[in-house]
Structure formats: C-alpha cells, structure tokens
Image (spheres, rainbow, N blue to C red):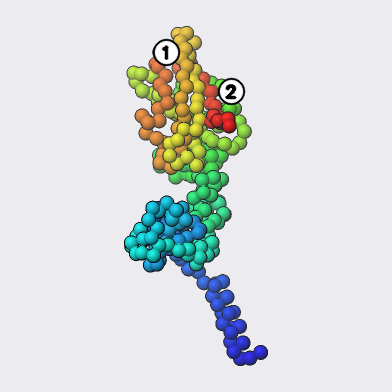
C-alpha cells in the first residue's frame, strides 16, 4: 500500500475517533421554523440567503417567489443537508428526570411528551415539591400527608360524608386518573366542594370527566341532584383558586354533620359513536 493510501486511512481513522468521542452542543431554537417557530419537520425549504421553513409553512405561503424573512427573490428550494441534520439529532424527553429514557428527533419530542408515561403530577400541598406519576402521587398524599382515601369504580356511586379538608378518590384498579375532593366551609352558605381530575397530560384546565351528585339530609328529608364537568389538571401550578375550582355548594341545613351525605357518581368521558 502506498504512503498516500496509509495517510488517507489514518486521516479517516482520526475523523472517526473525533466523531465518536467529541461532544457538541447546538441551541435547539436554530432547528425551529422561521415562519411558525415550531420545530422544523423534513422536508425543509430554504431561500437563497439560507432562511429555512418547514414544508407545511411553505405550502401555506401565498407568495413563494420572495423570502418572507429577507424578501430576497428566487423562491425556496429543498435543503437536503438540513433534512439530514434533523434526522441525525435526537433529544431526551423532558421527563427524563422522572425516569423516561426515550430519545426522539427534535420535531417528534412534543408528540411523544403528550403521552409519555413518565409525565408527572404535582403535590397540591403548599411547600411540598413532590412530583411523580398518579400512582406515586396517590401513595404520597395518603402516606406522607395522611389524607383519607376512597376507592371507587366507574359507573358505580359511592358515599362521602361532609368533612372539611381534602380527600383522595382513586379507582379500585391501579392506574388511570386520580381525583381529589376538597371540602371547604363557606359560612353562612355551607360547604363548597371542589373535585379535580389529576392527570399528568392535562397542563391546562380541561374537562374530560363528568360527575353526578346527589345530596340529601336524612333528618330534613331534603334531596338535590346535579351534574357537572370536572376540571382536569396536573397541578403544576398548585391547586386552582378556590372560586375557580368550586364545583358545587352543599347548603348548611343541618348542624349535625353525620346526617348530611354527599353521593358521587364518577363517569368516564363520553365517546362519540361513528
């Protein structure tokens, strides 16, 4: 083998060692579309200057002859090199600190995190920094904060006695959303009841569950029925403000708490038939 061939092989070996051992960092925002600012998804298009946009934004542009950033003429062309960059870079899930080991392409990270099984819920108790799965949160609330708990099955009613404070409501089967019921004395009206669905993938206050409530007093012979939507949240911002989270108010018609009962029926989300 010639000296030139040996030197060429040595150069390739050194480049291989460099790519295998060196680590670099790239700001992820440079992988964002200059039009919608979402992560770029192949195929990528660029103008003559180099401003890049994703394919969906390229299709939406009314005027494709000028760059929407710098207005240079010449339109957009495919950028195969950028496609290769996007396919070569993988990022860790933001829930890696909670045990997720999945790495995805940057443009697929958000979609993965929408259903990541390691997404956390947060403890609503002030000053407590606990975060974990719904099962871990349930154990934390009942063991560390000594909150009472009630197990229930979907479609079957269960009885709660009015008692100021917070109570954990969970399915008899392990897994699935966790519920919290909070009873707050609101003189002179009675007891305000807040019911929340704790779900790691509900960052905003959405409504995924509905609940039927029957209130009755054995001594007064008084009965009331109502139906309402339950707020879903991961408690990342703590327990919602009292007024925002009040689901209903049980009137104070009896001085004996043992004669007042609230019966709840938790129902799963309604599924539309095709």
Instruction: Tell me which residue sits at (59%, 27%) in the image.
Output: 153
Residue with the mark numbered 1: 254
- Looking at the image, which is closer to me, 18 or 258? 18
Task: Give the quadrant of residue 125.
Answer: top left
Q: Nearer the viewer, residue 102 or 79?
A: 79
Helix, strand or loop under label 2: loop
Residue at the disc numbered 2: 156
Choose between 228 and 62: the one closer to the eye. 62
Q: Are marks 2 and 1 in contact (CB under 8 Å)?
A: no
Which of pointers 2 and 1 indicates the residue nearer the eye?
2
The structure residue drawn at horizontal position 37% and vertical position 56%, both measured from the top left corner, is: 63
Residue 133, by quadrant, is top right
- x, y percentage for residue 61? 40, 53
**Residue in view at x 39 percent, y 35 percent:** 240
> Where does the C terminus fall, quadrant-wise?
top right
Q: Quadrant of residue 13?
A: bottom right
Q: Residue lying furthest right in this view?
A: 1
Q: Position of residue 50 (x, y in %)?
A: 40, 66
Residue 73 position within the rendered picture, expressed as x and y whole percent measured from the top left: 36, 64
Q: Residue furthest bottom?
A: 3
Question: Any mark on residue 39, and which?
Answer: none
Which is nearer the N-term, disc 2 or disc 1?
2
Quarter holding the N terminus is bottom right
Specify whether residue 90 is in view.
yes
Residue for point 50% across, 59% down: 43
């Amino acid at each position: 083998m010639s000296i030139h061939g040996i030197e060429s092989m040595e150069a390739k070996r050194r480049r291989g060692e460099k790519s295998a051992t060196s680590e670099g960092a790239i700001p992820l925002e440079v992988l964002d579309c200059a039009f919608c600012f979402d992560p770029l998804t192949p195929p990528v298009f660029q103008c003559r200057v180099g401003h890049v946009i994703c394919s969906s934004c390229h299709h939406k542009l009314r005027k494709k002859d000028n760059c929407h950033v710098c207005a240079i003429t010449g339109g957009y062309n495919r950028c195969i090199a950028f496609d290769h960059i996007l396919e070569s870079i993988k990022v860790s899930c933001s829930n890696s600190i909670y045990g997720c080991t999945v790495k995805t392409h940057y443009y697929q990270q958000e979609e993965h995190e929408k259903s990541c099984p390691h997404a956390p819920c947060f403890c609503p108790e002030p000053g407590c920094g606990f975060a974990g799965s719904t099962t871990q949160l349930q154990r934390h609330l009942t063991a560390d904060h000594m909150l009472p708990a009630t197990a229930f099955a979907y479609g079957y009613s269960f009885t709660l006695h009015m008692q100021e404070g917070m109570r954990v409501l969970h399915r008899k089967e392990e897994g699935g959303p966790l519920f919290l019921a909070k009873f707050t004395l609101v003189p002179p009206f009675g007891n305000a009841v807040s019911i929340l669905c704790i779900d790691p993938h509900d960052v905003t206050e959405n409504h995924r569950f509905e609940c039927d409530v029957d209130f009755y007093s054995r001594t007064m012979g008084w009965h009331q029925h109502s139906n309402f939507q339950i707020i879903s949240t991961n408690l990342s911002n703590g327990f919602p403000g009292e007024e925002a989270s009040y689901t209903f108010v049980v009137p104070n018609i009896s001085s004996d708490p043992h004669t007042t009962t609230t019966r709840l029926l938790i129902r799963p989300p309604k599924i539309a038939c095709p």
